[in-house]
Image: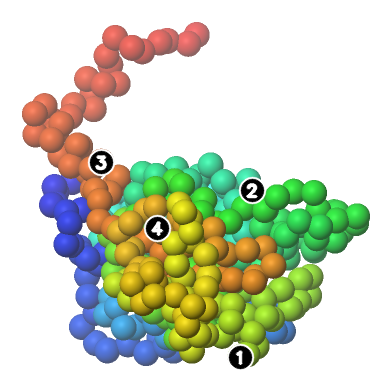
């Protein structure tokens, strides 16, 4: 393996991935498979957004890989005219880690759902983020188990009545953004499936980031949890509820009527007219404390929902470090497979 120098501050997330010689279009990323999600599913919107966005990266399709776990969202690789793999329940980040370490010439994407990623796959997710493996994770959050027909998930709100909680869920749900920030992810974003422009912008920044990038996408399940995010899609309600953050910009929303200000060690929402301009928080995606405080503004009832890029910092990636370590060890003492196989730590089984 040839040693390459990657993972330093200032390097983009696409270093080492071959570029395409010819311009590409969204249709180039559509496979010949029939897209089979339920009518009205938010997955269609995300699929179309990704297929339209990928050509802007200028990468060769054979150097892009989508890996999924189990769930409705995990059909994604079938519908992408790239390489891909439908893997094991909750284990997509682990499989993607191996691929990212072995193949620095690939742009590796993981597609997962709130059940797949946060229940059986919780450990794999947080350790991938902690290690800062160079891959992008799209977490489709519809607050329900869709593929297995409507049980409550790790993001279902308290009191949620489902097939598995007929008297209402007693569980306190995960806030995926808070969880990712707690694992010290180097990039964390959130978007709503119906906001094509906002989703595309977060995806663009995630693709440019070198390291683990988690993007939570609020996505509607019309069969088992229809209308879960309708208040964020109504124009009047959305203006009062959605707080879109942009690095380096004051955090105001609702046409400038509302602003985010500090409240002790946390944040709160106030009327812009009632506060001084200097009191309005300016977003800093490199400030972990601020990013976490913003994540806590997002409530179960969607009274306030922060979207955009919460955190975006450069730090060394696991896969770059692993390749560098192998190259260093190989240079110091070339590997001898025969010696390894016939060394002292072997046993003969009769």
Seen from the viewer's position, the closer of residues 306 and 81 is: 306
| Sequence-wise first label, 1 or 4 | 1
Q: What is the number of the mark on residue 235? A: 1
| Sequence-wise first label, 3 or 2 | 2
* Residue in the picture at 79% in, 70% down: 224
Question: In the rendered view, does 255 fall on the left or right side of 150?
Answer: left
Instruction: Locate residue 311, reporting x and y percent.
Output: 37, 61
Seen from the viewer's position, the closer of residues 264 and 118 is: 264
Disc 2 to disc 4, C-alpha distance: 27 Å
Disc 3 to disc 4, C-alpha distance: 31 Å
Residue 59 in view? yes
Question: In the rendered view, does 211 fall on the left or right side of 30?
Answer: left
- Badge 1 density bin: few <14, some 14–19, many ≥20, Cα 10 Å: few
Instruction: Locate residue 6, reporting x and y percent.
Output: 17, 54
In this rendering, is residue 135 above or below 95? below
* Residue in the picture at 15% in, 31% down: 329
Q: Indicate which label's residue lies in the foreground, 2 or 4.
A: 4
Seen from the viewer's position, the closer of residues 260 and 25 is: 260
Task: State the residue position of label 2.
Answer: 119
Q: What is the number of the mark on residue 290? A: 4
Q: Indicate which label's residue lies in the foreground, 3 or 2.
A: 2
Question: In the rendered view, does 55 fall on the left or right side of 296?
Answer: left
């Amino acid at each position: 393996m040839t040693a390459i120098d990657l993972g330093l501050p200032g390097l983009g997330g696409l270093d080492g991935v071959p570029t395409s010689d010819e311009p590409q279009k969204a249709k180039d990323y559509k496979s010949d498979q029939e897209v089979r999600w339920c009518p009205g599913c938010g997955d269609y919107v995300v699929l179309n957004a990704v297929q339209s966005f990928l050509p802007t990266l200028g990468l060769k399709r054979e150097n892009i890989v989508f890996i999924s776990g189990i769930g409705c969202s995990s059909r994604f690789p079938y519908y992408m005219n790239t390489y891909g793999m439908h893997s094991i329940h909750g284990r997509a980040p682990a499989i993607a880690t191996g691929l990212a370490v072995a193949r620095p010439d690939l742009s590796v994407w993981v597609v997962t759902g709130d059940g797949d990623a946060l229940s059986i796959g919780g450990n794999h997710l947080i350790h991938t983020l902690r290690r800062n493996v160079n891959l992008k994770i799209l977490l489709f959050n519809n607050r329900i188990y869709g593929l297995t027909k409507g049980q409550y998930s790790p993001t279902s709100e308290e009191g949620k009545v489902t097939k598995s909680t007929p008297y209402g869920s007693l569980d306190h749900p995960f806030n995926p953004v808070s969880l990712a920030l707690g694992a010290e992810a180097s990039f964390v974003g959130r978007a709503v499936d119906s906001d094509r422009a906002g989703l595309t912008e977060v995806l663009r920044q995630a693709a440019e980031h070198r390291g683990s990038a988690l993007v939570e996408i609020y996505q509607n399940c019309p069969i088992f949890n229809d209308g879960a995010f309708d208040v964020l899609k109504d124009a009047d309600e959305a203006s009062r509820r959605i707080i879109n953050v942009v690095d380096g910009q004051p955090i105001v929303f609702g046409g400038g009527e509302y602003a985010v200000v500090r409240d002790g060690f946390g944040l709160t929402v106030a009327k812009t007219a009632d506060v001084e301009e200097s009191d309005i928080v300016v977003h800093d995606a490199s400030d972990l404390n601020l990013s976490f405080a913003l994540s806590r503004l997002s409530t179960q009832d969607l009274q306030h929902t922060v979207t955009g890029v919460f955190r975006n910092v450069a730090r060394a990636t696991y896969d770059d470090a692993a390749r560098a370590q192998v190259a260093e060890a190989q240079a110091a003492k070339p590997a001898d497979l025969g010696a390894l196989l016939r060394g002292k730590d072997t046993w003969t089984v009769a």
